Amino acid sequence: MNWDLYLAREWEKRKYYLLHAREYVKKIKDICVKEIDPECRVILFGSVARGNFRIDSDVDVLVITKVRDEIDRARVSQKLHDAIGVREPFEIHIVTKEEYENWYKRFIDVYEEY
């Protein structure tokens, strides 16, 4: 396969998710509230929120919830990826309120909360 053609196809596929990321984030919020934690917060951040994404960008989604156990967090992440029907390019970060306040909040410059 021609490398340029491959990259062009991959970019078109990825671009769709980057351009429609907010629809997927809303779905993540709905699933989280209904099935995981009614008080969860869902935040879109990173290059998609800033509007300067590139071909290699991912969609950074922060889910703030009461779930603490690492295995349970992995299950939550898998459930949310399954719910939206796609893994790449979504990077779902499952964190507690304390982790958000003590770490993420200091580094997130632009965000959208759902």
Image (cartoon, helix red, strand yellow):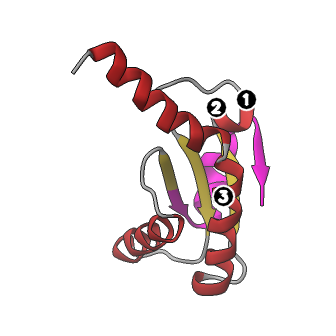
Q: Secondary structure at mark 1?
A: loop
Instruction: Please give the residue where the numbered disc 3 appears in the rendered image.
Output: 25
Which contiguous range is marked in magenta? 93-114
The crowd level at tag 3 (other Cα within 10 Å; few <14, some 14-19, many 20+) is many
Q: Secondary structure at mark 3?
A: helix
Is residue 10 positioned above or below 99 on the image? above
Amino acid under disc 2 = Ser
Nearer to me, 42 or 90: 90
Separation of marks 1 and 3 at Cα, in angstroms: 15 Å
Instruction: Please give the residue where the numbered disc 2 appears in the rendered image.
Output: 47
Instruction: Please give the residue where the numbered disc 1 appears in the rendered image.
Output: 51
Counting residues from the start of the chain, the first of labels 1 and 3 encountered is 3
Amino acid under disc 3 = Val
Residue 26 at x, y percent in the picture: 71, 63
Q: Specify the quadrant of the image occupied by residue 50.
A: top right
Nearer to me, 85 or 94: 85
Separation of marks 2 and 3 at Cα, in angstroms: 14 Å
